[in-house]
Amino acid sequence: MAQAEDRADRWLREGAARHARGEIAAAEALYREVLRVRPEDANAANLLGVAARQRGDLAAALDWGARAVALRPGAGVFLANYGATLAEAGRLGEAVEMLRKAAAARPDDAVTLRNLGQALCAMGDPRAALAPLERAAVLRPDAAEPMLALAHARREAGDLTGAAQAAEAALARTGGDPALAAQARFLLAALGREAPPARAPASYVRDLFDQYAPRFEAELTGRLRYRTPEALAALLRMAGVPAERGLRVLDLGCGTGLSGLALAPFAARLEGLDLSPRMLAEARRREGLYAALHEADLLEWLPRHPAAFDLIAAADVLNYLGDLAPALAAIGTALAPGGIAAFSIEAGGTPGTPYALGEGMRYRHDPAHVAALARAAGFAELAREAVTLREERGAPVAGMLFVLRWRPGATETGHG
Ligand SMILES: C[S@@+](CC[C@H](N)C(=O)[O-])C[C@H]1O[C@@H](n2cnc3c(N)ncnc32)[C@H](O)[C@@H]1O
């Protein structure tokens, strides 16, 4: 008996050591051995949860996390890990409850405090997020992430001066990490403190949608009354694009696949592309919808796939880009001659200025400017429609839909 106990202790230690070296499968095998001998071992259950989360298996991570907490309800580290997993799964109410208990047990754990603050923000309660995030930023004076999270919470709570101060402080803490610096600068630009960059940093968009992925559809189609994909599909039909399942279609910034559902009637073959792996994981669950899904930045991917598509559609995607000229050129390259581009923009940029970055951290464009860019890039306009894209804080977000035909070689004056 004592021997079995010793063996279990050894397996746990060896598992943790392998885990730390990144040998996840080997570590998991050892933790399972521990549980065979000691089914009530909360450490092994907790570590299996951590490993499952690292592998991206959220369902298993949730099961193991719940088991560890049930076995040892007062252990702060188990509460913290389970809370972080709940937040990642979009179960925000439970996450906040768990992370609050974890923070009470370990009040100086900056990661737990940051996770708690970010879960509160995601739940729409940025004011409640301020205290844990301020504390996390104090506890980690060398780290940019908690300070950046605090800057976002202050912005969402309406404290724009405090948000800019925190974003400046985050910028000073990035330690040369270019992705973090770009995120801090992007926030400063959205707050009007710097000129807006030509695009949202890819790392910002990826993080934003990765954390949004489990809740995206429920929120967009519910509270936010998102209707861009259907409106875009209707405009395509109106412009005479045949909905006869005959085209090679690319759903650019496909997200979880809401836009793919609206585009499917046009597609003999539908592909999706997105920056966010977690959005793509949701899209992959729609069996049979996409023939292929690509994790990539559209500006990098499109030029490498010349003339590959008959229709490229981007629903609620180009508002993460400021300068649309490179995107239009890249879409043109990936379209076959005569192919169709369809996309939405958020309208309301200042006339005469190419783009404006709003406090909501998305770009708005002047439709007349976009139409001129499209013409200059070699597109002929087939249709345009002013629409409400969705709602934000109860107010409609005004947008414009475009349907364009690609005419390679055509110039602004060479109509054909
Ligand atoms: C608001 S969602 C819209 C998703 C989908 N089109 C729909 O209508 O439901 C925007 C998506 O565009 C993706 N995205 C934004 N910029 C991108 C880029 N440069 N390259 C690839 N994907 C991008 C984001 O990751 C996100 O999934």
Image (cartoon, helix red, strand yellow):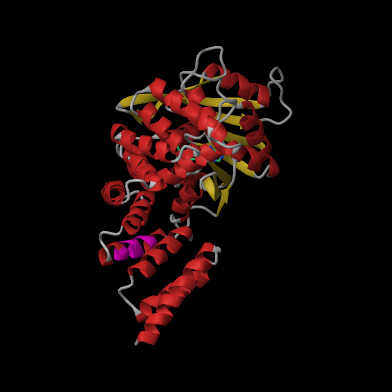
Name the residue: 59% across, 35% down: 340
Residue 162 in sight:
yes
Q: Tell me the chief SS of the magenta region.
A: helix
The reply, left or right, for residue 269 in relation to residue 107 is right
Q: What stretch of residues is rendered in magenta?
A: 61-68
Count the marks: how many? Answer: 0
Q: Nearer the viewer, residue 141 or 251?
A: 141
Screen quadrant of the N terminus: bottom left
Magenta stretch holds residue 63 = yes
The reply, left or right, for residue 380 in relation to residue 171 is right
Residue 166 in which image quadrant: top left
Residue 399 on image: x %, y %: 44, 25
Name the residue: 25% across, 61% down: 73
The reply, left or right, for residue 398 in relation to residue 186 is left
Q: Is residue 73 above or below residue 29?
A: above
Q: Is residue 294 above or below residue 385?
A: below
Residue 27 on image: x %, y %: 49, 70
Residue 254 on image: x %, y %: 50, 44
Screen quadrant of the C terminus: top right
Name the residue: 39% across, 86% down: 3
Residue lying furthest top: 352
Q: Nearer the viewer, residue 349 or 343?
A: 349
Q: Is residue 381 above or below residue 68?
A: above
Q: Nearer the viewer, residue 102 or 253?
A: 102
Magenta stretch holds residue 240 = no
Q: Nearer the viewer, residue 399 or 237?
A: 399
Residue lying furthest right: 409
Name the residue: 50% across, 26% down: 168
Residue 362 in sight:
no
Residue 5 on image: x %, y %: 37, 81
